[in-house]
Amino acid sequence: MRISQSTFFEVLTGIWVNVTSGWFAILLIVPGLFGTSSIEEYFQLLIKNLPFGIVGFVIALVLTKEE
């Protein structure tokens, strides 16, 4: 069974979109669930997780262009 390149990139793009959604969910949901005690704590979460979300988004865009 052979998988076409476009199908491979389509599936990979779907996976990266879900990973990126997870990173952005961490940014939005975790502070509300666990109740960050201060704005500094929230910014720490933002600084740690925002780059992963942005990188995932860029990877998804690149993979979409490959299709």
Image (cartoon, grey):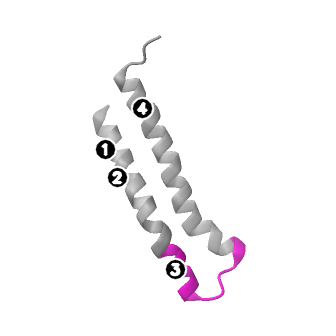
Horizontally, residue 26 falls left or right of residue 58, namely: right
Q: Residue at x 48, y 53 (%)?
A: 20
Mark 4 highlights which residue? Answer: 10
Q: In the rendered structure, which disc, 1 or 4, sits on the residue that comes first in sequence?
A: 4
Q: Is residue 34 magenta?
A: yes
Residue type at mark 1?
Answer: Val
Task: Report how far apart the C-alphas of labels 2 and 1 lie in the structure.
Answer: 6 Å
Q: Position of residue 12 (x, y in %)?
A: 44, 36
Task: Report how far apart the C-alphas of labels 4 and 2 lie in the structure.
Answer: 15 Å
Asked whether the beta carbons under mark 1 and mark 4 sit within 8 Å of each other, the answer is: no
Callout 1 secondary element: helix
Within-10-Å neighbours for mark 4: few <14, some 14–19, many 20+:
some
Can you tell which mark lies on residue 53? none
Mark 2 highlights which residue? Answer: 58
Q: Residue at x 42, y 18 (%)?
A: 3
Above or below: residue 42 compared with residue 58: below
Task: Report how far apart the C-alphas of labels 3 and 1 lie in the structure.
Answer: 28 Å
Mark 1 highlights which residue? Answer: 62
| Residue extent of the magenta highlight | 33-46
Callout 4 secondary element: helix
Q: In the rendered structure, which disc, 4 or 2, sits on the residue that comes first in sequence?
A: 4
Mark 3 highlights which residue? Answer: 44
